[in-house]
Each structure stands twice: as C-alpha cells, then as structure tokens.
Image (cartoon, rainbow, N blue to C red):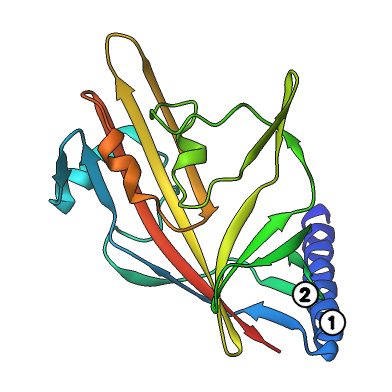
Amino acid sequence: MKKVLLFACIFSLFACAKDETKNESSNGNVYVSNDTVNSSRIMMYTSGEQIEDLSTIRSFISRNIHSDLFIGEGEEEKSQLRYKVSFIFDGNSVTEKYMNNTFVYDTIQKDNNITLFVKRDTVLSLPLDTSRLDCFNINRLIGATPAPVTCKTDECTSREQFPVFIAGNKITRQIINYFFIRKSATQNCDIYGNWRSDYFNYGILSKLQPGDTLVFQTASYSLYKQ
C-alpha cells in the first residue's frame, strides 16, 4: 500500500510540474529544456601532462571516483537529461525551476550572445585567491566566470553566477563535471563537483603541481522558447 501511495505522490508531483510549466509558457518568455545532454570526451591532466588513453582514464575513475560523477562512458556522446529545466524571464530577472527547486537571478548582458545569470541570494565567502590551485579553491576556479567576492572589514560575500549562450529561440547552458586529487608532502586531499554551470577554465591546467590529477568533462544542454 505504501508503494502505491508513494507512486501516486510522485505522479501527482510531476503532473503538477508539467501543468505549471504549460501555464507559465503563455507569457512567451519561458524557455524549457529538451531531453538531450551533449557531453564531451573525459579529459585527464597531471602536472605538465595530458593523459589521452581512455582505458587509463576509466581505470583511474573506477579506483577513485563515484561512478555517477561523469556522463556516459567517457566518449563524446548524447545522453538523456534526467529532469526538465525552465527559465522564466521577467525584465532583467530570470527564475530557474527544476524539480522542486526555484532560483532567481539578475541578468547582465556580456555581449550579443552571452548573458550572465547572477543569483539574487548573497552567501558568505572566503577571499578568492587565483594565484594557486588546491582542494580549497578549485571549485571556484574550475569555471571561466567565478563569482566576484566583496569584502567589508572581516566579512566577505559573493553571488553565484554562470553564463548562458542565447541565440534566437534557444539558450545553451554549459556544464562541468570534475574530480581533483592532490598527493604531496604538504597536502593529501580530493574533491569533486558535478553539473557546475560554466565554461571550463583552461587556465588552471598550468597551475597543476606534481602529485595533482584533474579529470573533467564538459557538457551542455539547450532550452527552447515556448
């Protein structure tokens, strides 16, 4: 009986979400994702070296990383997006909705096609040090557009941001999945992140030190005007 009730609840949730998106679409400023994620080949770097052999990369992943961190089998491929994402525009603001999550952003036009989504909510942050790379700051440096940090006296804050590419009736969102491990005399650590919204920051590859390994994958999906 519990299983039946659970199924009914889930069915009702998705039915309501579908109806909500349909009603919001009537204002003409709603973009909804399709079902396809385009993922790139998984890349692996150490200090001064790129590992291209896919069997070596897969072996490293199986020894160190949760199996669901990356999309697909490591090659360039298409996969299914697990949930619908919608962007609802209202002037210079946009609301993102997926599953039971809602986020509100301010929009900043960077050029003809790139727009920054800057989250309304401000969070406490540490000062951003871009001169080095380690387990404490890679999550902020992995993307090409890290959130600016504002510091006043002894408190620093930031607002999460990410770029989207807008062309015609389509918005393309870039994604980064990554795993970083450091084994050195001064630090032994590892950290991962997935579905990070941004373009990959290739500049961090020059900051890898002996004992570092970085595995990453870029991906993208599109949202279409309704």
| Comes first in the chain, label 1 or label 2 | 1
Q: Nearer the viewer, residue 190 or 128?
A: 128
At 50% from the left edge and 38% from the top edge, which residue is drawn? 139
At 23% from the left edge and 23% from the top edge, which residue is drawn? 211
Q: From this viewpoint, is residue 67 visible? A: no
Quadrant (top left/top right/bottom left/bottom right) for the N terminus: bottom right
Give the residue type at disc 2.
Ile
Dots 1, 2 in contact, CB < 8 A: yes
Give the residue type at disc 1.
Glu
At 46% from the left edge and 68% from the top edge, which residue is drawn? 220
Q: Give the percent coordinates (x, y) of residue 121.
A: 79, 46
Dot 2: what SS?
Answer: strand
Q: Nearer the viewer, residue 136 or 64?
A: 136
Q: Quadrant of residue 104?
A: bottom right
Q: Farthest residue in the top direction?
A: 185
Q: From what the image shows, is residue 203 above or below residue 176?
A: above
Label 1, residues with CA under 10 Å away: few <14, some 14-19, many ≥20: some
Q: Give the percent coordinates (x, y) of residue 106.
A: 75, 61
According to the picture, the residue beneath numbered tag 1 turns out to be 24
Dot 1: what SS?
Answer: helix
At 15% from the left edge and 37% from the top edge, which residue is drawn? 48
According to the picture, the residue beneath numbered tag 2 turns out to be 88
Q: Give the percent coordinates (x, y) of residue 192.
A: 45, 37
